[in-house]
Amino acid sequence: MKLEVRHLRRLYGETKALDDVSFTIGSGEIVGFVGPNGAGKTTTMRILSTLDEPTSGDALLEGVSLLEHPERARAVIGYVPDSLPVHRDITIHEYLDFFARAYGIGLRRRESLIQSLEEFTNLMGIREKMLGELSKGMKQRVSLARALIHDPQILLMDEPAAGLDPRARIELRELVRVLAGRGKGILISSHILTELAEICDSALIIEQGRLLRSGTLEEITAPERMGRAMLVRVMADHARLAEEALLLPNVREARLIGTDVEIDLDGDDQACAALLAAIIGKGFAVVEFRPRLSNLEAVFMNVTKGDVQ
Amino acid sequence: MRILHAAYEWIDDALNPIVVKELRQAVQGKFITGILILFLFFQIGTLAFSLIDKAATNNFDLGRETFVVLMTFVLLAGTLAVPVYSGYRFATERSDLDSDLLFITTITPRAIVRGKFLAAFALVMLFYCASLPYMTITYFFRGIDLLSIFVLVVLSLVGVGLNIAICLFIACLPLNFALRIVVGLGALMPLFWVFGLSVAMTSEFLRMGIGARLLTWGLWEDMTPVLLFLVFCLGMLYVLSVAAISPPATNRAYGIRRFVTGFWALSLGIMLVYSVKAANARPLGAWIIIATGLLCMAILGAVSERTWCGRRVARTIPTNFLGRRLAFLFYSGSAGGLAWAIGLIVMTQVLPVVLLDAWGLGGLDLGYSFEREREGIVALTLYVIGYSLLGAWIRRTFFPDRIPVAFTWFLVALVAGLGGALPPIIGFILFGSDEEGWLLGNPFLGMQNGSWRETSLLFAAGFAGLMLLVHLPWMKAQWDRFQPVGEGAIDLDDVSALPS
């Protein structure tokens, strides 16, 4: 199933919460949604989950307008908010049972469905625990189980890793991967960009309601990779390498970072090969020679200004 | 066995999910269990006290007196404890996030409110069921009959329903925690009022022997208007609650206007029959005054609505001639709401008199003070129209982005307050005059007796007429824009074309 977002705009008075946002989520694709607080991520997710209405634009699910047929969208979209609502005096199992009933799932299917979701999200052993007694990580798993109860094809996850400990984050990441493997399209927003970069196929960077960059991670980081940076580790004389590298052709900058020397150079792969040959030629024992990859964090810092409306 | 299982499955699937969840939570929580134990303790205590009281042997009203005490305990639980508990739970649950999660399921806002109401009602029924054996025992104490016991038990449920509806409505209001506490404390007054009235009703009905009068016209002649009003309150609270928790993009006004119009027609019909049967049109006269007063509030609601019904609603506008016109009046939207409210007020004033004349009953007395009160309420209505439109104009012209449209009613109240208070102050300070003419901006001036009533009526008519004239182009523009998708000239994706 493909979710196609077309020119979404959302105005609150004069404030543009979303300004001409367009992107696509395909089956089995994990799309990272990155932006500072107040950038428009939650507004986008609320519109896509039919909780809000855009001022203009639309979102199409397999060509069917989400605005014209919100009830159809609800049947195929699952939404995981950043925190679980307060529900006292109710167990995990009862909570899931409640939402299964709310989705109109009949008794015959309900029990087996909830059981399989509890197994999938590793909640089986604690299903009779009260919601109020759960840790943040457990709550997030309950939230995910709830969002999956009607077997949605598109999953919207708003900051699902916020406040989770490392183990819970790793578990969540694995669950997301499994879900994508089952063909679900996933839009996931997070402030932990290194983690997003690990699981996402593509990313959207948004600020002040405007999509600044979108595409596969390769495409997104491409502009930052135009000028290359290489990391070189040698057996000895690191400081001398940092000094002498500046005299080599195509080198713009060289600096010592710990035991590594970071060299910025202009040019393509040929220039890299020539640099390596020149360093070896100067008698340095090269242990490691690798490009410094431009990551999502670097791109994010480059393209966003940190402004809020 | 298979049939039983199929029946169980059918019942389980048909159950409102909210009811199931609420009752599960109530059973697992401590509050209801605690209250129930306390309740039973008091019930048993009351019976025991009645039995061991030596004076009881000669008291032929012991059954009635004991029943009233037991009923008071039941009403304490049913009209106060359980409604407040249910409302509090709903309010704490109803963070934006929580209600949002429900709205992305297939459950409707109506089902949510109904579920909450039924769950609270089921809890009250638990208290009633626990109490019924004790209340029935009072029959053997003398002074009360079984029919009276059961009739009073059933009648008291109206008060229970009303208080549950009040508490749920407050819980539904989109207010922050502090404001909700303030409104909740304010709501204690009607809650206690209903509780007190229910206890008083129990006592009074027992005194007059309701069991014996149950099938007499006299009883129902007195009860019908009260029951009608209570049903209106219940229905109104229900539709308002549904609208309050519905997402802003939905057709929130539709349910409210449909209910009000339906109830308006039903109550008019009942009052007509009532008047004809009693050969006395006073009930109809009272209905005209009350209905006009209530519809004034609809004007304030209409100006506080969004101007355009929104894209989601626009897609459901019927394409046929009549359908679109009716939809304009009933769908969410400020101009349509104004037209609907004003139209209904005019019909309230005109239709009953026309119908009475049509039945040859034009000479029926509409009440001793009817004409005087009608003049007052008409003047007030005209002031409300004038100030509402003035407030809406001020918001649109000067504060389109600073004051949310939903708070236009507040601006209207402010403008009306200033309109009433400023002119006499200015008149006194600048001209040293304390003539009543300076009071013409006071919306309640027409309600008072005196020589100024006609002048204020004329002034209000002029004021309302002028504001309506000013708003005519605006209303015409709203009508032109009220187009089904694909039919109208408006480009839904062109933001600049949308009205503010």
Image (spheres, grey):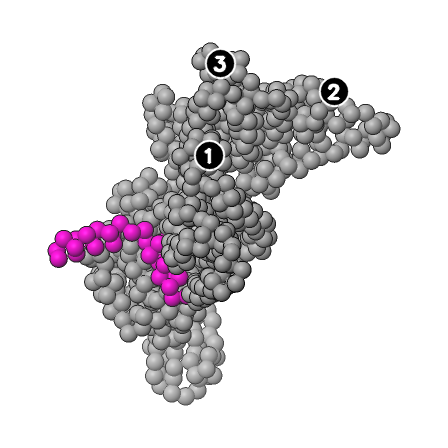
Report the residue at 43% width, 73% height from top.
Answer: A263
Determine whether label 2 and label 1 are within 8 Å by CB.
Answer: no
Give the magenta-colored segment's residue range: B1-29
Decide which of tag 2 and tag 1 comes sooner along the chain: 1
Of A126 and B8, nearer the camera is B8
Identify residue for label 3.
B361
Q: Is residue A56 visible?
A: no
Q: Amino acid at mark 1?
A: Leu
Q: Residue furthest bottom?
A: A236
Whether residue B52 is visible to the viewer of this picture, yes or no, is yes
Q: Which mark, by number, is residue B219?
A: 1
**Mark 3 and mark 2: Cα distance apart in space:** 32 Å
> Which amino acid type corresponds to the residue marked 2 in the rendered image?
Ser
As drawn, B270 above or below B108: above
Rendered location of residue B184, percent (x, y) = 56, 52
Find numbered disc 3 in the image and state the secondary structure of the residue it sits on. Answer: loop
Disc 2 to disc 1, C-alpha distance: 41 Å
In percent of the image, x 33 and y 66: which residue is there? Answer: A92
